[in-house]
Image: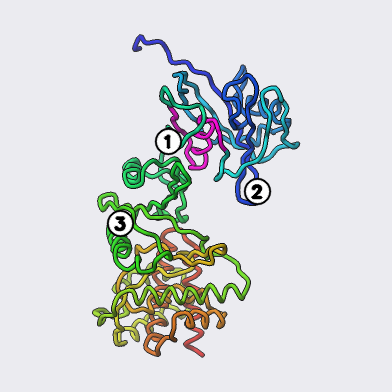
Amino acid sequence: MSGHPRHTVPVDVHLIAVRDGASGREVLLSRRAGDVYAAGLWHVPSGHLEAETVVDAVVRETLEETGVVVDPADVRAAVTVHHRSPAGGARIGMFFEVRRWHGTPRVMEPLVCDAMDWFPLEALPEPMVAYCRAGLDAYRAGARLAVHFQEPGDLIAYTPAADRLVLIPGPGSGPGALPEQDVRAFTEQAVGRITSWTDVSWAREESRVWRAHGPEGSAWYVKAHQNGRFHRREVDALRGWVPSLGAAGPRLVAADARLRAVVLTSVGGRSLHGAVHPPALQRRIFHRIGQLAAAVHSSTPPRPATNMTLPGKLELHLDAALPHLAPGDEEFIRATAQQGAGLAPLDAVSTHGDFQLRNLRWDDTADALYVIDFERSEEGPAVRDFVRFSDAWHGRPDLYQAVMDGYGRPLTPAEEKHLAVLGVLNAVSGIAYGAAHGDPELVERGLRTLARLRATRRS
């Protein structure tokens, strides 16, 4: 026992009522009015904990302030905020997410609330209580705990210049986790104050990418590479040929070889992976993809190749893929590899290395195409960038033609041979990797590629 007085603070409960709106997730806010704390500022429905559980408290406060009924079973813990006001008083705020309720929210206490409305989580209104804004920013970042200690002289209303939010990372590094502390510090040294983090990693163990949000609507991407080789490749590309793409690629803001981390400017659009577009728009997008591929491959002068198409890890990948292969696949793979060993090398150019729909983004509003993720970039034959992308045009000769029209020329007979060999070898490595890392989409794509190439060979 230290002998010091025990630290006792009030406990608040806050409702984060969320619905899907036209522009994404929306949250319910009310505006304080009358002779109350923070009059004129927006805030989520909230109140003090009484002689009850925190779940019962948020259900009670929701009914009293909004008139809607919430089933306790629909209450979800969102984030806890340790807050200190500018006057020095501290309290614990417990924020709860609710997505289902009965009734329509309306102002129930007009003496202390003069408005209630829905607002996009990504475009919160002003003026807003800084304490509440901290809770919502922490919620958007996927944090479970945050500290928001304001300083004497700070305003009650949120201002970007006095953003005191500190996100506390939880255990582990799964989806939704914050970057490590040293990565967060590196990012803030590069671009300034970060108010919230959004984990945008792909559902794979090694993918660690976050969208970092600044205090005035600015945003960056932060990536931590799984190994030094990927880090060097991405940094070399971003410093070398990517700037020649102009607005179609991100710009490198900062890189740290020790952390294997980079900070990049944000690009717009949505990933083309899984996207559905009308056929005419698809052809236009694929034409633009061909133009982008040509820009990548012409960003540096071609050089005589020093390596062959055949990679060195075929046996290792084949052993891992064997349990998933169809009868006859192994013989087909070995025969194709033998043919690849006899092919004359092609000239080497800058290549993206992972050119596929997942790493291409399309913005309908700006009519713009963007490319991301350069960790597999290296010099190689230009046709290397069509290996993973060829699955996207399979069965659609119009899309294949759109790509080639945009590229400015058809593939040469030599490139077609290399493409077939590289397609088989990439399918094997994809099956092996997907099976080892729980990625069924990679396994299925590899099996589909093998079946397609075997059918092509027979025909």
Residue 344 image offset from top left, x and y in percent: 29, 87
Q: Quadrant of residue 433?
A: bottom left
Q: Report if residue 132 lies within the magenta region.
A: yes
Indicate the amino acid at tag 3: Asn
Give the mark toward the camera: 1 or 2. 1
* Picture disc at residue 227: 3
Q: Residue furthest right?
A: 103
Indicate the amino acid at tag 1: Ala
N-terminal-most mark, 2 or 3 = 2
Q: Residue at x 44, y 80 (%)?
A: 407
N-terminal-most mark, 1 or 2 = 2
- Using the image, determine if residue 316 lies above or below residue 127: below
Residue 326 image offset from top left, x and y in percent: 49, 75
Residue situated in front as seen by the camera: 9 or 65:
65
Residue 217 image offset from top left, x and y in percent: 48, 46
Residue placed under numbered mark 1 in the picture:
161
Direction from residue 149 to residue 125 in the image, left or right = right
Residue situated in front as seen by the camera: 109 or 445:
109
Give the mark toward the camera: 3 or 1. 1
Q: Report if residue 145 lies within the magenta region.
A: yes
Residue situated in front as seen by the camera: 417 or 294:
294
Give the Cα separation between the discs numbered 1 and 2.
Answer: 30 Å
**Local crowd size for mark 1, using a 10 Å CA cut-off: few (<14), some (14–19), many (≥20):** few
**Local crowd size for mark 2, using a 10 Å CA cut-off: few (<14), some (14–19), many (≥20):** few
Q: Residue at x 36, y 78 (%)?
A: 382
* Picture disc at residue 21: 2
Query: Which portion, as a residue range, is magenta?
Result: 126-149
Q: Quadrant of residue 128?
A: top right
